[in-house]
Amino acid sequence: MKNRTHTNYKPSIETAAIHKVGSLRQIAGTRHSVLTNGGAGGVRAIDVNTGAGLIYTIIPDRGLDISFASYKGINFSYISPQEELSPAYYNYSKDESMRTFFGGLLTTCGPVNFGPPCEDNGVSYGLHGRFSTTAATCVCDKTDVENGIIEISATISNYVLFGEKLEIKRTITSTVGENNIKIKDIITNKGGEETPNMMLYHINFGYPLLDTNAKTSVNSSKCTGYDEYSQKHIDEVTSFAAPDAAIKEKNYLHEMDRKIPGIASIKNEDLGFGIEIKFDANALPYLTQWKCENARDYVQALEPGNAPCNSIAEVRKSGQLPILAPGSSVENNVEISVTPL
């Protein structure tokens, strides 16, 4: 021992960990699979483990959206009874998409329309658009655990003959050893005509994070109910009730200050953590809060978007419809993080 060199050498935590494992996936990383159960048969899945307690599942065949999500084994996403149903079962008619809505941590709505079904300029639009039932292509996993990087990217295309041609380049990243998910979408109009581009990030929370002791916060400049019932219960915007069939669905519109980042959160002191959402409020100046306090349909969503969650016809009539010129692009950024309390 007296002749040992480098007596001041102290390996980093990362180096020490690498020397103690056979596969880096013991620490963190991604795992690709194909689901086989029931209506989810054939659906591609990518499980992500950040190595710090956060585990979530990306579904390439559902727009590279996110289904299950947990922190240290505790679930915080809402999963519908349909679970990760194949998009092959999707029906765009009116509100039939509720039969394929899997909830999950993230269901993206758009890219042309979201909100209730309607007719607009002679075109029929279904509930919340086709994004989350469109299979991603060019799925690329650039994860490099040794250098602390988890990165999944893909292309989601919304092409119609004689119609809109929107292409979304989505990148989902996390940092090894941290508990965050960053979603970046670059939406480009590949067609030759102006095209509506309504985008809403339907981020869904469920039990046990969501419970009667959960508290919700949004740094909005204004909050109103979408309907009379919601407005009557505006004082319940921060709380959540026990399951009760007598409680109707509530929807609130938060208008954000475009000059500062949008921040929304749901926290549960009893569990010792919460989930915080940060987003670019200049690109996504609205947040819709959706509350369902019924048995089994026990879910709350915090949904940053670039328009109020009304039909495309209503949004157009109000002068709030986002339009993409031919060849132009917009970028949306949303970050979801675990916040220990």
Image (cartoon, rainbow, N blue to C red):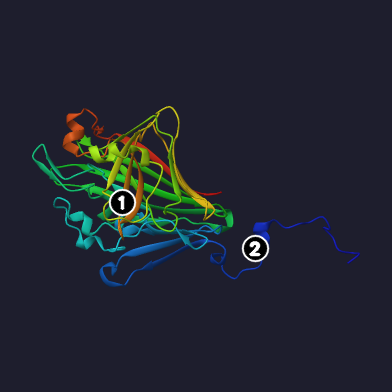
Label 2 vs label 1, nearer the camera: 1
Image coordinates for residue 49, horizontal then vertical, percent: 50, 60
- Say what amino acid the circle numbered 1 marks: Cys
Give me the residue at 23% from left, 50% from top: 130
Residue 17, numbered label:
2
| Mark 2 crowd level (few <14, some 14–19, many ≥20, 10 Å Cα) | some
Q: Name the secondary structure under disc 1.
A: strand
At 28% from the left and 40% from the top, the residue drawn is: 230
Inspect the image, locate mark 2, and give the three-letter code of the amino acid beneath it: Ala
Residue 340 lies, in percent from the top left, at 55, 50
Foreground of the two, 166 or 41: 41
Which quadrant of the figure has residue 37? bottom left
Dot 2: what SS? helix
Q: Where is residue 188 in the image (x, y as percent from the top left)?
A: 29, 39
Which mark, by number, is residue 224?
none
| Residue on which disc 1 sits | 292
Residue at screen point 40% across, 48% down: 171
| Left or right placement of residue 206 versus residue 167 in this view | right
